[in-house]
Amino acid sequence: MKNLEGLKLPALPVAAQKILSLDMACDRDQDALIPAICQCPVTTARIISLANSNEFGISGITISSAKQAVQRIGLRTAFNTALACALSSLAKSNKNSVLDQDQLWKHNLEMIKLANSIATYLPSVSRPISADISLACLLHDIGLIAFDAMEPSVFKLFSEELQQTNEADKSALEQKFFGLTHAELGATLLSSWHIPQIIIEPVRHHHNHNLDCNALSVLSKLLIVADVLSSDSQYRNEAYHHELSIADMAELLALSVEQMEVIINDLQQKGLPVALKDQHSELSINFDDAIKVHLNWRTKFRVAITNKESLDCSSISSDTCCALGKWLHGNAKSQYYDKVAFQYLLIKHAQFHTEAGKIALMVNNRNYIEAECAIDQGTPYDIISKNVAQTIINLRKEIDSISAA
């Protein structure tokens, strides 16, 4: 297996053929879904487990049958879960598999929770539907299963070297052993099975952090971010190192850094794994990102006005919630408080968030024309926004001069 050309791919598993033949818009096929699920004990167990998970479970009420599970999680989620299980059944051909299927399944469920939680913060007009998110998460690592099924002896050697070397670039190691990555193989395999392109693209790109954001679907971006955040999960079968900061993830999802920080805090409170390469902690600050984030609020307000979205007035009006605010009121205060530029930025930054909070309140009160006028050129918001950007530049120059001395 050195390239995709001429590669003999596994046939679509029979169980998957049966699932794909069902039309969930047809009452008769809806009734046939539960018997199809029950034909496989593993699929039945996983669907019941999903129904009893925190995502769907009801405290004190545990279900034990496939029928109850389907009723709780819904037909579409049950269909997608059964399909993912059926597609993954190609691993049954390898009795000496070194791939831990249970661990992989738990990682997939963790991905679903992460991706669905993040998706709730995206604008409703661009937010992928939950069923597509779940199916993409369940299938994103199917290339690993295919490696194990198609080249079991090579996959065993690959797994051993991965564990021994703690290889930072897993994709490079996959290229070394197989001539392609599991993401490429997974996408190609799903394409040969005629799985919808909306699912294939996220599977192909879930480790690709270098593409132009505009080239990817929102679902692909969501999967990239969820996969990055789960990089320290106990259920991953390998060490995974990434180079995405909070600002990178925010840009990928067309959110502000502040919004991304709120999302991450929410995920952490839910007990989900969150691995960060954080360049915006209280100990350091990226001045270019800080300028960009604050100037971009004008665009965020315009989007909210256009889409008639509600905003978080509390966090927007606070000067301690954003990355710059945390830095100013944290470690920087002890280092630079005696600097004129620092004290000036402290004042101007607080004024900026006061003005931004007023506009957010206008938007929430549906005073859209007033809000649009408030972010126009020459307004108090416009003036303080530019003042903050210039003061950040001035402080950076002062700090750079101290470092150079």
Image (cartoon, rainbow, N blue to C red):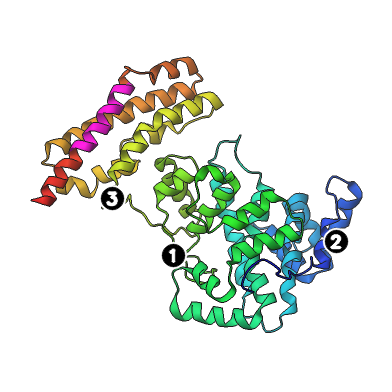
Q: Tell me the mark number nearer the camera, choosing from 3 and 1.
A: 1
Residue under label 1, please give it. Answer: 241
The span shown in magenta is: 381-394
Tell me if 60 is positioned left or right of 360 in this view. right
Residue in the picture at 47% in, 31% down: 311
Q: CA distance from mark 3 to mark 1?
A: 23 Å
Query: Residue 91: x, y in percent?
Result: 71, 74
Report the residue that reaches farthest toward the right: 28
Residue at disc 3, secondary structure:
loop
Q: CA distance from mark 2 to mark 3?
A: 54 Å
Residue under label 2, please give it. Answer: 18
| Magenta run includes residue 383 | yes
Q: Which numbered marker is on residue 321?
A: none
Query: Residue 192: x, y in percent?
Result: 75, 60
Tell me if 301 is positioned left or right of 102 in this view. left
Q: Which numbered marker is on residue 282?
A: 3
The amino acid on which the numbered mark 1 sits, given as a three-letter code, is His
Residue in the picture at 38% in, 27% down: 357
